[in-house]
Image: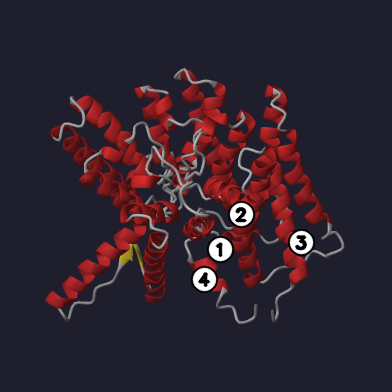
Amino acid sequence: MKNFRFKPVYKYLTFMLFMLSLLTFIPPMVYSLYVEDKEILSFIVPIFISLFLFSLSAPIKTQKLTEKEALFIAVSVWFLFPALTSISYVISGYIPDPINAYFESVSGFTTTGASILTNIEILPKSILFMRNLTNWVGGLGFAVFAVSFLSTKLPIGKAIVKFESSKIVEEKIEPRVKEVTKIVFSVYILLTATQIILMKIAGVKWYDAFTFTFATVATGGFAPYNQSAGVFNSFPVEVIITVFMILGAINLQLYYLILKKKSLKVFFKDQEVIVYLSIIGLSVLFATLILYIKGYYHNVYDSFRFSLFQIVSAATTTGFSTTDYSNWHYSVLALMMIIALIGAVGGSTGGGIKVYRLIVIGKTIYGEIKRIAHPKVVYKLIIKGKPVNSSTLNMFWAFLSLYLFTVLIGGFILTLGDHDLITSFSASIACITSLGPGLADVGPASNFAGFNDFEKLILSFEMIFGRLEIIPVISLLFFKEL
């Protein structure tokens, strides 16, 4: 552990855990008091555990961290905080198994939406409120909350945010990270408040408006009902959720730029957004035609309605469902897995490989073909008006290789447990992309309870790897000083 200072790392790590525990447990605790469901202890215990751990760091002086130490904190908090939250599930008695509780917690914070619960609705409403709140907190990212909201004086903000995979603030639109994170946080709050109000106007109860909004803007997919979003059976509500899934899956900084420049041109001039919306539009058209022509629905309206919602849910890696699509035509199911693997726009709450990487792949292929046809032509890779250097390109291919390798290894490990190929590899894709539901035994009408403890841990780590975009986690293994 050469040059690794445990004390300051412990101080900042436990501080983040404590502050995040206040954000995650106090709202459902207040709601528990309101509905009198006697779940107060489930929320108080994790808060006091985090407070106790942080109190041990009182004698430790505040120090500036190195990038390596900040990286350690940024990665560790994603493994440790779900463990703290799992205590709440265990104490409640509704998820008594620690591994199951950890899986559910990781799924929440990574905005995956996969679940081991066979009957969601038997859980107390306050526990389900917390469950959906984990989607909301994880959607923006622990670092963004810590820097922009929970701690205005945290001296490690820039280093922590740099390593968090959401890439919410990867493009500096303001000179200081704290200002950028506050801007993004404000946009996040605005989207959340707007959807809650619209859901209420559409006739949804306040509790449902809050819980579904938490999972929608975070593209998380948790729902307090077994039927997911299908419980509403309302096209207007589905449209609201659909729109905000897309809004959550687009770079949050664009909304700030739109407000700053007072023009929507910023939105429609962004190459990544145009490609993303095109993918969604063409996919919805394809799915609608297939479902109607193949006779899954008797009219174009129903074919379009269900296609729109499920394609957007997959493309944004949210994982909501309004119907059991597991019996749909194989081509549509395959398309849903593909667009989930591609994922959302960079700088959004969505998961997947990200659309800008798809653009890089396309332009790289085009460049190579152009070089073959015209050997003397110098071709530069330009993304969003800026040339991509070789270092960035090497990092891109390293990420893509590790990402796909993780999908394959995860799926292979699951087949060793006698799970079929579709279940195994769709579960692996669903977890690393943060999609949630997969196909076959992990489809929208099923869950992940059929996996053993080892397999659930593998999938939990895969969810974290996907949320952190792998590179930060792998990087820890190669820090010689650690």
Q: Nearer the viewer, mark 3 or mark 4?
A: 4
Disc marking residue 474: 4
Image quarter hosting the C terminus: bottom right
Residue ID for mark 2: 143
Q: Amino acid at mark 1?
A: Phe
Residue underneath mark 3: 11
N-term-proximal mark, 3 vs 4: 3
* Residue 147 visible in the current orientation: no
Query: N-terminal of the two: label 1 or label 4?
Result: 1
Secondary structure beneath dot 3 equals helix
Measure how far apart labels 1 and 4 are at the Cα level: 12 Å
Q: Residue at x 60, y 82 (%)?
A: 480
- Quadrant housing the N terminus: bottom right
Q: Residue at x 43, y 38 (%)?
A: 262
Where 348 sits versus 404, above or below?
Answer: above
> Mark 2 or 3 closer to N-term?
3
Q: Is the residue under label 1 in contact with that under label 2 (CB below 8 Å)?
A: yes
Label 2 neighbour load within 10 Å: few <14, some 14-19, many 20+: many
Q: Earlier in the sequence, mark 1 or mark 3?
A: 3
Q: Which residue is mark 1?
A: 163
Instruction: Specify the quadrant of the image occupied by residue 234.
Output: top left
- At horizontal 27% and vertical 38% (from top left) the residue drawn is 327
Q: Of discs 2 and 4, which sits in the foreground?
A: 4
Q: At label 4, which amino acid type do we have?
A: Ile
Marks 2,4: beta carbons within 8 A: no
Dot 1: element? helix
